[in-house]
Amino acid sequence: MDDHAPASAAVAAVSEATSEIARADARIRELEAAKVIALDIIPGAVPIETYRFPKRCLMLFGAEGPGLSEKALELADDVVYISQFGSVRSINAGAAAAVAMHSYIAQHL
């Protein structure tokens, strides 16, 4: 019987666990680097046509009418708006999401 087998198995298990921890740490760093982008028509917001979306981001869309909450705007790294013509300064949230996601993908293809 090999007396070193249990020790070898333990070393292999520790090595695998260390690799898993390293992969998890890398994923956490990647997620922490993601930006929160709010889409709302408010003073100080940047037009979507000139905004450069980061590769990793989460987009927040508000309810039609009231828009995003103050808390959501505080959490956002950037605020972007969709340029519009006419007197209506609001579009359906689903339409806004489609425009924003298309803008993102057009930049990151």
Image (cartoon, helix red, strand yellow):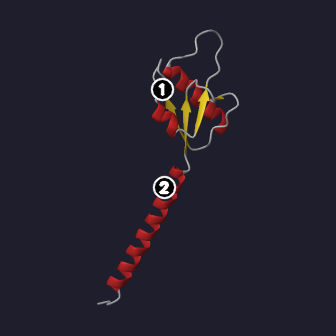
Residue 65: horizontal and vertical position, in percent? 47, 17
Which residue is painted at 55% across and 46% down in the image?
34
Is residue 94 positioned above or below 6 on the image? above
Density class for disc 1 (Cα within 10 Å; few <14, some 14-19, many ≥20) is some
For the C terminus, which image quadrant? top right
Residues at marks 1 and 2, CA–CA distance in whole angstroms: 27 Å
Q: In this image, 1 relative to 67: left or right?
A: left
What is the total number of numbered labels drawn onto the structure image? 2
Residue 72: horizontal and vertical position, in percent? 47, 34
Q: Secondary structure at mark 1?
A: loop
Mark 1 vs mark 2: give the one in front: 1
Q: Earlier in the sequence, mark 1 or mark 2?
A: 2
Q: Amino acid at mark 2?
A: Ile
Which residue is painted at 63% across and 38% down in the image?
53
Q: Nearer the viewer, residue 13 or 32?
A: 32
Is residue 15 positioned above or below 71 on the image? below
The residue pinned by badge 2 equals: 28
The residue pinned by badge 1 equals: 62
Q: Amino acid at mark 1?
A: Gly
For the N terminus, which image quadrant? bottom left
